[in-house]
Image (spheres, rainbow, N blue to C red):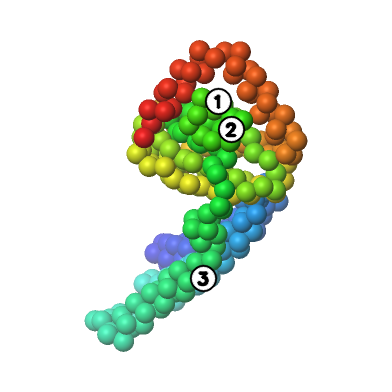
Amino acid sequence: MGNRWSGMFWSLLFLAVPVLGVATFAVAPSYDIWLPKDVSEHGRSIDSLFYFILGLTGIVFIVTEVLVFWFLWKYDGARTKAPATFIHGSHALEVVWTIIPAATLLFLAIYQMNTWADVKMRRPRIAPTVEVVARQFEWRLRYPGRDGELGTPDDIFLVNDLHVPVDEDILVQLKSMDVLHSFFLPNLRIKQDAVPGMKIPVWFKATEIGQYDIVCAELCGWGHYKMKGRITVESREDFDRWLAEMEARQEATQPEADATAAEVAAVP
């Protein structure tokens, strides 16, 4: 009797996995523990791709778990006295379960090509809006000054406080000063590794005014948890006003700004 209840327990436990899993996904948005709010031009296509893959893998997950439950229930050793039968391999089955996953992955690779190109290949034809240099454990920012060019004496330097104008293409020049970091803007659906020795372009267009998080998505050392910043999306007028204020503040502390410029300029 004990063995019988044990078999029933394990079969019901495996059935609870897909039931509770689907229920969790169903109620998560109501508790604000789902994807962060999308405020980017390309976010909709990224989210659509995510939901498509989630649905596809979710169906496979549910079917697999239900089959596990069915076999545990049907062939419980405490209730089934017939001897077990075995299949010692089937070439046809092996071909089928190799072709189906391969075809699925090929389909996904083709299906996501346009979204990937928008985010990683179709770079806007503009000069860099800002340079972001990752270092343990902060984001160092450099804006071009009045001449509109990076790497000149009038550059403006800040830390962890990125500002961009709304509804405009933004091109970030991403670098790392020390180890591997990952520049992550959850609300803008942007995540890009910052690799030492490389200058990596990152672009986006923010569509809604507000303040959002900048975090590091790569374990980069003991202080990784505190490597946080903010991105402020604002109107062009407010952005120009803020940039002018930062320029005036930097001119008032020019020796400190020159030291920061020298340190950033040393990053390859």
- The residue most toward the bottom is 92
Using the numbered discs, state the Cα–Cα distance from disc 2 to disc 3 in whole angstroms: 42 Å
Question: Circle 3 — which element?
Answer: helix
Q: Which mark is residue 111?
A: 3
Badge number at residue 75? none
Disc 2 element:
loop
In primary-sequence order, the first of circles 1 and 2 is 2
| Label 3 Cα neighbours within 10 Å, binned few <14 / some 14-19 / many ≥20 | few
Sequence-first disc among 2 and 3: 3
Please state which amino acid type lies under the numbered disc 3.
Tyr
Classify 10 Å Cα crowding around label 2: few (below 14), some (14-19), many (20 and above): few
Q: Amino acid at mark 1?
A: Asp
Q: Residue 58 location in percent, x, y?
A: 53, 66
Q: Which residue is mark 2?
A: 147
Give the Cα separation between the discs numbered 3 and 1: 45 Å
Specify the label residue 154 is tagged with. Answer: 1
**Circle 1 SS class:** loop
Q: Residue at x 66, y 36 (%)?
A: 232
Above or below, 67 relative to 230: below
**Relative to 235, is 122 on the left or the right?**
left
